[in-house]
Amino acid sequence: MRTILSAACTALALTWVPAKAAEVPIVTGEQWTTSSEAVKKAYLVGLANMVQVEMAYYGRNQPTDAQSFVPRLSKGMQGQSLDSVRQGVDGWYAANPAGLKRPVLDIIWFEMAVPGLQKK
């Protein structure tokens, strides 16, 4: 059933959203640093929801590390709140103004989640 549902969702997504990978917007520090606190929080809520949906979808049969970064992201970010992540990203861009072209998700992964995994 999961396979059929997944295939149906993929087919619908491909039908409704014919975007190429190059057309998918990537949020960088340029957008992040000019966004309001509410917009930043909305971005993080969207990211958190994506993680929760994937974790719920797989249930006890979590994908391997080679198949998805989501379980590792979830583990590495344990103990973080939306505000602590927002402050962490804000702080990184403030300390690294030359890095404004670096994607926000890159900051969250390499500067927060990976170090969080190493503490576990």
Image (tube, grey):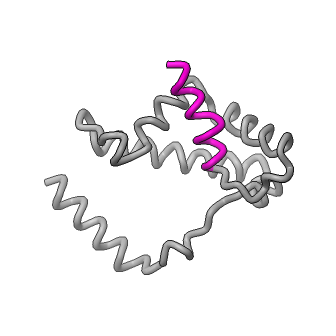
- Quarter of the image for residue 84 reads top right
- Quarter of the image for residue 113 reads top right
The residue shown at (61%, 40%) is 110
Magenta includes 115? yes
Where residue 30 appears, as percent x and y from the top left, is 78, 60
Q: Quadrant of the N terminus?
A: bottom left
What secondary structure is the stretch in magenta mostly built from? Answer: helix
Please determine whether, in this image, residue 71 is positioned above or below residue 28. above
The residue shown at (71%, 58%) is 28
Q: Which region shows up in magenta?
A: 105-120
Does residue 15 appear to the left or right of 119 in the view shown?
left
The residue shown at (80%, 45%) is 93
- Quarter of the image for residue 29 reads bottom right
Please determine whether, in this image, residue 86 is positioned above or below residue 31. above
Please determine whether, in this image, residue 56 is positioned above or below residue 25. above
Magenta includes 12? no
111 or 6, nearer to the observer = 111
Where residue 34 appears, as percent x and y from the top left, is 82, 57
Query: In the displayed image of the protein, which residue is found farthest to the top?
Result: 120
